[in-house]
Amino acid sequence: MKALSSWICLSALFLFVACGGGSSDSAPSSQVDSTASNPAKDSLSDLRSFSNAILNDGLAPGDNALTLMCLDSLLSPVRSVRDHYFSVFLVICAKADGVLTELVSATGLDYIEQFPEEALGRVKELPDVDREMLSERLAYDFYASGGQIKSDVNEYFQDIEKAVSPELASVATGLKKSIIEDAQELKDLEQE
């Protein structure tokens, strides 16, 4: 999860510099044209359009700034934003490969950790095929860490299982078992 935080900071810095943030050419705030478009609002509109295109199979998610912003939106403090971007997250999960797989895994684990009731409630409602795909993606983080898979997964879920209702604790337990199996399978494949 620390890797995701570093990645988010680097992504934010990249976007800040790429968008001309901190440029000495910018006009003082008292001289800004009030009829000019709002770059932040335009950016959010672009992100929503991009995410809708992903949902409608109009665009494939990739290792780019807008896909990363979609992933970051799953961690928004605003529930309605998370509602939209959870569906986008699942599509990105299904199509992720390479570096994007690592980011999907870390984002998914951060989401469960920050919003356990909501996240596990959504996991509970997923069709089996989507739940299995999510487990495989989340397992990647534990596999890639090189640690003790079973103990690392158990440690991750320890506080989460205590923080949620008994019904969702059983969902967490099922997800935990699937993640352990999937991460171990990845490790076994590597050793072949």
Image (tube, rainbow, N blue to C red):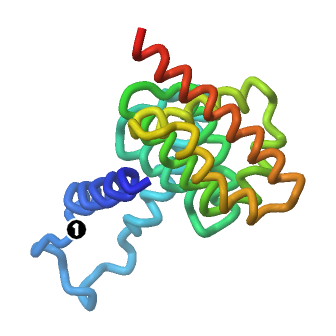
In front: 53, or 125?
125
Above or below residue 101? Residue 122 is below
User: Image check: 85 left or right of 44?
Assistant: right
Q: Is residue 142 above or below residue 94?
A: below
For this rendering, which residue is in front, 103 or 3?
Answer: 3
- Residue 56 visible to the viewer: no
Seen as rendered, the residue at the extreme bottom is 30
Percent of width and height locating residue 118:
75, 57
Q: What residue is drawn where x is 22% and y is 68%? A: 21
Residue furthest to the left in view is 24
Residue 118 seen from this side: yes
Q: Position of residue 49 (x, y in %)?
A: 54, 45
Q: Which residue is mark 1?
A: 21
Along the horizontal axis of the image, is 107 left or right of 130? left
| Residue depicted at 58% across the width and 44% down the height | 153
Q: Position of residue 88 (x, y in %)?
A: 61, 41
Q: Nearer the viewer, residue 58 or 123?
A: 123
Residue found at x 18% / y 80%: 27
Mark 1 Cα shell of 10 Å, populated few (<14), some (14-19), many (≥20): few
Q: Position of residue 115 (x, y in %)?
A: 67, 61
Taking the view exactly as shown, the residue that stands out farthest to the top is: 192
Horizontally, residue 105 falls left or right of residue 177, namely: left
User: Where on the picture, by quarter, is residue 177?
Assistant: top right
Which one is nearer the viewer's eye here, 25 or 114?
Answer: 114
At numbered mark 1, what does the secondary structure look like: helix, strand or loop?
loop
Residue occupying image coordinates x 53% and y 25%: 95
Q: Is residue 21 above or below residue 90?
A: below
Q: Amino acid at mark 1?
A: Gly
Q: Is residue 133 left or right of residue 146?
A: right
* Quadrant of image for the C terminus: top left
